[in-house]
Image (tube, coloured by chain):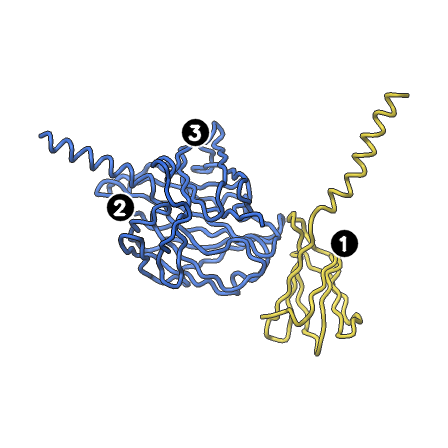
């Protein structure tokens, strides 16, 4: 019984640390104005893991969703530049979201 | 007769001292960039610790960058020779032929690692030996790592085991010395601090040194040995650029004269603030 208790504690610590370890990487996101009416965005993580399939949401100046996209196999995407104010959200889930205002997207 | 011996001895001593401190440089002020953009670089063949004699570089055989975003990202190679222009680099006691490289933002725009590779033409040292230093300098944009730890496939190279662009002062840096794709057991290594900051506007070393005085010549170009697996570890006591050279890895011939192939890697160290 005592042995089982001893075994349970390290196992529990091990399982608790798994999601923490998995979350230790930082999301990274970057967008550029292609100067041809399109915007290019690319995502990634600080541990080098892929961001393929991560949703990217384009919002208008009021914060309303105007386009929902997904990063490609190469963790990037291109879309038409919205008219007026806009922002682009990398939605990697809780604690992994990055929003870039259009005013900070340059050539 | 005696005078002849003394002269020969002095020449030998001078040659040995010079050979210890030759470093091909690929320089830019900052290797870890938050955002990409246009990049200003210098390719200089010089003595980084004392900032003295700069050697004339010949034509550049290869100058390219391999970019990779993410561990599983696609690696793309870009030839950079079209962005080179010849300059004269001013050291403290002479001027030497070198190159400026203005890399356009379209090359350095994406996040990820950028492995810069320079293969200079062989440099004739004296009359009896050519030196060819295969040089790497690794940058990152945006924090997404990629191929910083991958061998490029050069005949000789130093492969990093730590990110060359993310080193705190007081930390250590590790690497592996390779020749013909294999680690070189007990390889000789020379480590030098870039003691005079390059002034890219003037194409010259600044006058104020980072380290005012080395207590002994052994501290200027520090010689160490790799272990039996070709791996080495160095301490990083001061912020700035450090050059790591592995001399004499492959001995061959060029134009009927002996030639040695050497590997150089530049790493940058940053203070904790």
Mark 2 residue crowding within 10 angstroms, few (<14) / some (14–19) / many (20+): some
Q: What element carries label 3?
A: loop
Badge 1 sits on which subunit?
Answer: A
Q: In the figure, the blue chain has which letter?
A: B
Q: In this view, does B13 lie above or below B72?
A: above
State which tag comes first along the sequence, 3 or 2.
2
Residue in the image at 66% along x and 72% along y: A103
Q: Dot 1 corresponds to which residue?
A: A95
Q: Is residue A96 above or below residue B221?
A: below
Q: Dot 2 corresponds to which residue?
A: B124
Residue in the image at 55% along x and 57% along y: B33
Q: What is the spatial separation of the Cα atoms under label 1 and label 2, in whole angstroms? A: 57 Å
> Mark 3 and mark 2, same subunit?
yes
Q: In the figure, the yellow chain has which letter?
A: A
Q: Is mark 1 on a helix, strand or loop?
A: loop
Q: Dot 3 corresponds to which residue?
A: B186
- In this picture, residue A62 sits left or right of residue B71: right
Q: Please, which residue is most extreme toward the top here? A: A2
């Amino acid at each position: 019984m005592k042995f089982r208790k001893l075994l349970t504690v390290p196992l529990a610590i091990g399982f608790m640390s798994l999601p923490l370890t998995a979350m230790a990487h930082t999301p990274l996101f970057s967008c550029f104005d292609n100067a041809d009416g399109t915007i290019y965005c690319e995502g990634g993580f600080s541990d080098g893991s892929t961001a393929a399939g991560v949703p990217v949401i384009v919002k208008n100046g009021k914060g309303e969703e105007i386009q929902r996209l997904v990063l490609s196999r190469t963790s990037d995407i291109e879309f038409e530049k919205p008219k007026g104010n806009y922002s682009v959200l990398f939605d990697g889930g809780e604690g992994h979201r990055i929003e870039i205002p259009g005013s900070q997207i340059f050539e | 007769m005696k005078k002849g011996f003394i002269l020969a001895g002095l020449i030998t001593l001078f040659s040995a001292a010079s050979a210890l401190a030759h470093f091909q440089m690929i320089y830019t002020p900052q290797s870890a960039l938050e955002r990409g953009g246009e990049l200003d670089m210098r390719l200089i063949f010089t003595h980084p610790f004392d900032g003295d004699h700069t050697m004339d570089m010949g034509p550049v055989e290869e100058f390219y960058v391999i970019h990779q975003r993410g561990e599983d990202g696609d690696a793309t190679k870009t030839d950079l020779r079209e962005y080179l222009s010849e300059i004269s680099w001013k050291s403290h006691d002479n001027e030497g032929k070198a190159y400026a490289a203005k890399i356009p933002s379209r090359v350095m725009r994406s996040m990820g690692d950028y492995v810069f590779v320079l293969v200079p033409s062989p440099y004739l040292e004296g009359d009896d030996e050519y030196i060819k230093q295969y040089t790497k300098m690794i940058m990152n944009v945006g924090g997404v790592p990629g191929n910083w730890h991958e061998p490029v496939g050069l005949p000789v190279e130093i492969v990093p085991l730590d990110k060359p662009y993310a080193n705190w002062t007081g930390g250590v840096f590790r690497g592996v010395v390779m020749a013909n794709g294999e680690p070189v057991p007990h390889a000789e290594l020379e480590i030098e601090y870039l003691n005079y900051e390059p002034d890219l506007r003037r194409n010259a070393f600044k006058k104020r040194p980072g380290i005012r005085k080395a207590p002994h010549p052994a501290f200027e170009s520090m010689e160490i040995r790799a272990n039996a697996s070709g791996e080495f570890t160095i301490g990083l006591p001061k912020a700035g650029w450090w050059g790591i050279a592995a001399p004499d890895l492959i001995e061959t011939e060029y134009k009927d004269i002996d030639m040695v192939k050497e590997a150089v890697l530049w790493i940058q160290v940053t203070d904790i603030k």
